[in-house]
Image (cartoon, coloured by chain):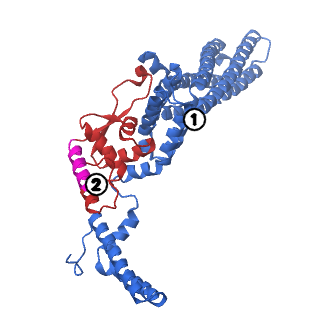
Chain colours: A red, B blue
Amino acid sequence: MGVPRMTLQTQLVLRTLLEHPDHEMYGLEICHAAGLAPGTIQPILARLEGVGWLESRWEDVDPHEAARPRRRYYGFAPSGADKARQALEAARSRNTSGGPWLLRPGGAS
Amino acid sequence: MTDAAASMNSPHHVIGGYYRRAVALQSIHYSIGEVGREIVADLRRIRTPRDFRPLKIQKATAGLLWGLREYESEVRRLAVDLKVGASMIDGYSTELLRAANLAEQLVGSAVTSSDSLRALNGMLEFVVSGATNLDLSSGLASVTAFTIALSREINQFNGQEILKTLDTCYQEAVRQADEKAIDVETESSGDSMKPDGLAMSLVRFMLKVLPSVYRHRYSEELRGELHALATAGATRAMQIIYMLQQISRVVQLRTALHTPDRPRFHRLRQSACWILESTVRTWSVTVVLLFWGGAETATDTGMGAAIVFVVSGAAAYGTGVSYLRNRWNVQVKRPDREDS
């Protein structure tokens, strides 16, 4: 699988997940943490999962007992966190070398 | 609600129950048909008064009558249950109501056949009691004709159709069992924090755009998130806005599911990369345009302005080309590889 498109939103999602690489989050939670609009998150998660960086699983509850549908939790695949860090670094260096007039991802360190 | 009670309410379970009962009905239906055919065969074998054994025929018709009564009461119960099921499971109400109507028709047929059988028994008794005085052959002829008509009536029972309708319903229920079970559970839980109906309709609308293999997953995922929003106290408007935002990106989601590593403007980028791979392709058109613009500027303004235009234009274009080649990892192909 190739590398997903590293848009600003994708970078924000990856940075959010990299804050706690072992922690799984569901879509709405990632939205709030990354400060993104809800609609933007699903295509990004689908793309990251499609290239094998992320893995997802259903919440381990019985919907009948919990009286609500299960949530879908997303977390890094075994080598996903490393690939994400590399891609973020590459995106950062690309933006830096692109000149001072280019926008940088929010909160880029 | 307990697990057992919840599973009893799932459409899979409910329709599965109807289906099994319809299968049982079908076997009763076949048994009735068999008994009817035996009676007709017995009657047709009568050639002389000695062959006429009214007790045997009466015994068979009594068995048939009992079978029909059982069939009738079972079909009646199934018709009632199907209507209850139809009101309980919205998604299948049309199909189930159709099955219920068919079952009611079967009740009508069974009642008519029972009445006919009772009449046949009466005729047989009349023929037996009056055999000494009446013409036995004409009496038997009427009984045989009546029984053949009854046999045809019984065979017209449309058990197969009701079974087919329920089978279609059952297969559909199995396919969507989990999803519908959640709906039934959510509806029956009486939870005041349940998601808004319009937002749920928007979920269903959105799912139609997604590839069929992903529909089930996103159905539950989006419902789960709507539920989380509702539990967090999101208003109806907020839930609808949330779903509208999801819908606004549904085409991107669909593309991401099909080709996760493909850029947004794939074709355009492919064409741009093809141009950037070659210095000749990159500069040929631009150089012509720059010189044409320079010539126009020289005519209108003067040579100095034309030189500034050409040099600054070429520099800006060159910077843009370098940036794109770097960003998209475009390697310039030989023989026109640039030294820089």
Q: Residue most toward the top?
A: B129
Q: Which residue is mark 2?
A: A3
Find residue A95 and report its image quarter.
bottom left
Image height of A77 relative to B334, above or below = above
Identified by mark 2, the residue type is Val
Find residue B55 and report its image quarter.
top right
Count of all numbered marks drawn on residues in the image: 2
Q: Main secondary structure of the magenta part?
A: helix
Q: Measuring 23% from the left and 52% from the top, which residue is drawn there?
A: A89
Instruction: Give the x, y percent position of residue A73.
Output: 34, 34
Instruction: Give the x, y percent position of residue B79.
Output: 62, 22
Identified by mark 1, the residue type is Leu
* Image side of residue A33 versus residue A93, left or right: right
Magenta stretch holds residue A88: yes
Q: Measuring 24% from the left and 76% from the top, which residue is drawn there?
A: B333
Residues drawn in magenta? A78-92
Instruction: Give the x, y percent position of residue B190.
Output: 53, 19
Q: Which residue is mark 1?
A: B198
